[in-house]
Amino acid sequence: MKSLVLVGAAVLGCFSCGTLSFRDIDRIIQDLPRHSSSRYVNRRSLPASWFGRAYATLDDPYVYIVLSDTGSPASKLISLFTTTVYNHVSLSFDRDLNTLVSYNGGNGVSSPGLNEERLEMLNQKPGASLAMYRLRLEPAQKRVMLARIRAINREGSSYNITGILSKKSRLPNIMFCSQFVYSVLAEAGLAYFEKKNGEVRPGDFIRRAEGLEFVGCLVLDSPALWVTGYKGG
């Protein structure tokens, strides 16, 4: 409860700075009771069909790191602390983003924690955009990552909404988006920069980009407007 009060104080601080509207504040406050910083509220949110699509990508020698500027109230709140454009990060096991996954608030549909993501979920403002990068890996490493995600899906998870204020989690699967992505990469030996798990923020994935290759940027309300960064597959 104390941590949620701190988030409430941060929300009011954002409003006083002009970062959040009354509507944004209302959406955040209405969503807070769905969260927990001490127990898992999300279990088995990823269906078998998601894992089927993910395991079908084992021949793809890359994992994709996707940073997004969604325009959601939570994204606006996080931006006050990160001072960066892209405030959400996800993983995908295919370039077409049919296996997009991360930790999030559930978009008012699913419980906060580990959830499958779709582009329409990330498109919450005019001009919402994403930047995609890829990291080479072996099929065995992709299997390790998927095994870790399957374990979280089975054990349970919660989205660490207090992560903007506190760097610690009471349970191992209570994480925020960048912590999740970093931990899964690290599990497979793919953490290409060194930072404490709870201190990783979305921008770190491109600021510390050893071995990372830019794929492209996409404005979500104009799907044809891909700006690509490489040729070929």
Image: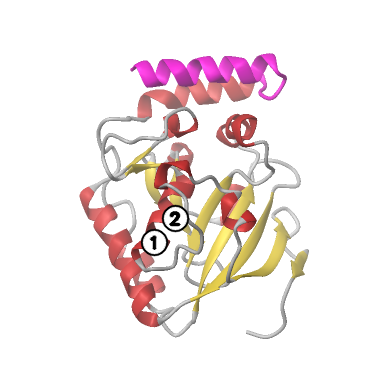
Measured as percent of width and height from the top left, residue 177 is found at 47, 47
The residue under the point 32% across, 30% down is: 37
Q: Which residue is mark 1?
A: 186
Cα distance in 3D space between marks 1 and 2: 6 Å
The residue under the point 33% across, 36% down is: 169
- Residue 2 is a magenta residue: yes
- Residue 159 is a magenta residue: no
Q: Which residue is mark 2?
A: 182
Measured as percent of width and height from the top left, residue 138 is found at 42, 81
Question: Residue 60 vs residue 50: left or right?
Answer: right
In this view, the residue in front, 10 or 129, is 10
Q: Which mark is residue 55?
A: none
Q: Secondary structure at mark 2?
A: helix
- Work out whether 85 lies above or below 225: above
How many numbered markers are drawn?
Answer: 2
The image quarter containing residue 233 is bottom right
Magenta residues?
1-21
Q: Residues at badges 1 and 2 in contact (C-beta under 8 Å)?
A: yes
- Work out whether 104 lies above or below 206: above
